[in-house]
Image (cartoon, rainbow, N blue to C red):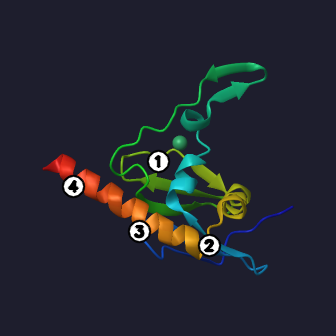
């Protein structure tokens, strides 16, 4: 299957990402899902043949970890994501990007749950700062 780039990407809420493709598929996901699926060697662990050269790291939950700063197209085949905590080694091929949207697509109910969850988290972060 030759998956092409989305025709539209936007961010309806600070923690949500929406994308639409030319074949009519569209979905909204939490940015957290995109971050957790980061395909870079550091996040997934790197294996060459049967030997595993590095073990997947659990994502350290810290302020900004799920906060997306930029999505940049890399040539014709992929998208690079930069996160507020400085992580920017993830390259999502268009195929991977589409699979993430198919797998983690959220509905209205999920979105209102996120609203509660992310509001709580931002309160926590504020308290820490004080
Ligand atoms: Zn990564």
Classify residue 4 by image quadrant.
bottom right
Q: Are marks 4 and 3 in contact (CB under 8 Å)?
A: no
Q: Nearer the viewer, mark 1 or mark 2?
A: 2
Q: Position of residue 52 (x, y in %)?
A: 68, 21
The label shown at residue 14 is 3
Local SS, label 3: loop
Q: Position of residue 77 (x, y in %)?
A: 69, 59
How far is mark 2 from mark 4, CA to CA? Answer: 28 Å
Residue at which label 4 appears: 126
- The CB of the residue at mark 1 lies under 8 Å from ligand 1: no
Q: Position of residue 85 (x, y in %)?
A: 36, 47
Q: Residue at x 65, y 72 (%)?
A: 27
Residue at which label 1 appears: 88
Task: Indicate which disc, 1 or 2, sits on the residue closer to the N terminus.
Answer: 1
Report the front residue among 106 and 51.
Answer: 106
Report the front residue among 45 and 123.
Answer: 123
Q: Quick check: 122 left or right of 6? A: left
Q: Residues within 10 Å of mark 2 (few under 14, many from 20)?
A: few
């Amino acid at each position: 299957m030759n998956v092409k780039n989305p025709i539209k990407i936007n961010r309806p809420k600070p923690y949500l990402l929406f994308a639409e493709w030319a074949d009519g598929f569209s979905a909204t996901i939490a940015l957290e899902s995109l971050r957790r699926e980061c395909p870079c060697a550091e996040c997934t662990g790197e294996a060459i043949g049967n030997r595993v050269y590095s073990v997947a790291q659990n994502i350290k939950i810290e302020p900004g970890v799920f906060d997306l700063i930029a999505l940049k197209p890399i040539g014709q085949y992929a998208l690079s994501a930069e996160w507020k905590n400085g992580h920017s080694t993830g390259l999502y091929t268009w195929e991977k990007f589409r699979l993430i949207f198919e797998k983690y697509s959220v509905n209205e109910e999920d979105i209102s749950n996120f609203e509660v969850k992310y509001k709580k988290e931002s309160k926590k972060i504020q308290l820490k700062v004080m």
